[in-house]
Amino acid sequence: MFTFVSADWVQERLDSPEILLLDPRSALRYMAGHPKNAISLPAAKATGANGLRPVEELAQWIGAAGLDDRRVPVLYDGADGRNAAMLAWILLYLGRTDVHLMDVFWEKWAAEKREAFYRPVAPVARQFTPRVRPELRATLEDVRVAASGKFVDFRSADEFTGKLDTEGKPGHIPGAVNLVWQELSGADHRVLAPREKLQALFAARGIGPGDRVVAYCRSGLRASLGFLALAQLGVPVALYDGSYAEWARSGLPVESSEINS
């Protein structure tokens, strides 16, 4: 569904008309330095008051940034990779099968003294055609009626157990296992840890290749990195982008070891 590429691979193609380099960080971070020809497309703008924007709005937003059906989207990120992971998931959900992600963060690019630019690049609007893949997204109803499958909660341990209450209803979706999202990161500014480590992390929580998994966190952002990790391992996975914030206000039951202990 997606491909990790090196910083060298990206640098060699900065002037290529075949790709579109997208920066999903905030506009402020984009202006503090970005590669040549990178277009700002903040992942935070993909959501509104009611969660993920409708498909038609997402298509218009992405098309306005210059992505059409011909150009290959190439994403990069800084700090922790959550924004690129979310944008990658959105593109996959909308039917793209050619998503590329730079496997190291912007901080690594800058540390290697690669060229940086500090002016915005004006996009040329194009037509983006969505081809929705509903199996990559889980809704509240999907999660509520799921008779099989496993849930992985990528929030902090304190959020999972209920020690930290962010929603007025502490705990987690019943039956979920916890894998703190930072454990997925690789060393030396790499987006994800090596495949062997990822396999071990999920195996320790009872997750294997034959499982159907729903990834969630509080609002979907952290879980999108978990989505990428599971997808890379070949595990069928859907992102519950409404996540625990939606579940907690739904009136459905939760589990909390802080309360149940």
Image (spheres, helix red, strand yellow):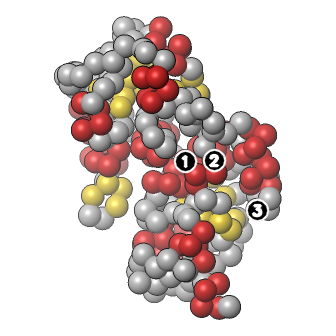
| Rendered location of residue 125, percent (x, y) | 22, 26
Is there CB contact under 8 Å for labels 1 and 2? yes
- Report whether residue 108 is seen: yes
Figure quadrant of the N terminus? top right
Residue 178 in which image quadrant: bottom right
Residue linked to disc 2: 184
* Crowdedness near tag 3: few (<14), some (14–19) or many (≥20) residues, C-alpha within 10 Å: few
Residue at left offset 46%, top offset 84%: 169
Q: Which amino acid type is marked by label 2?
A: Leu
| Rendered location of residue 21, percent (x, y) | 38, 23
* Crowdedness near tag 1: few (<14), some (14–19) or many (≥20) residues, C-alpha within 10 Å: many
Q: CA distance from mark 1 to mark 2?
A: 8 Å
| Rendered location of residue 170, percent (x, y) | 50, 82
| Rendered location of residue 182, percent (x, y) | 58, 51
Residue at left offset 63%, top offset 38%: 186
Compare residues 1 and 105 and report the one nearer the observer.
Answer: 105
Q: Viewer-nearest of labels 1 and 2? A: 2
Q: CA distance from mark 3 to mark 1?
A: 17 Å
Compare residues 136 and 47 and report the one nearer the observer.
Answer: 47
Disc 1 element? helix
Q: CA distance from mark 3 to mark 2?
A: 14 Å
Q: Earlier in the sequence, mark 3 or mark 2?
A: 2
Residue linked to disc 1: 225
Disc 3 element? loop
* Crowdedness near tag 2: few (<14), some (14–19) or many (≥20) residues, C-alpha within 10 Å: many
Figure quadrant of the C terminus? bottom right
> Horizontal placement of 168 versus 120: left or right?
right
Q: Which amino acid type is marked by label 1?
A: Leu
Is there CB contact under 8 Å for labels 3 and 1? no
Residue linked to disc 3: 205
Residue at left offset 20%, top offset 24%: 120
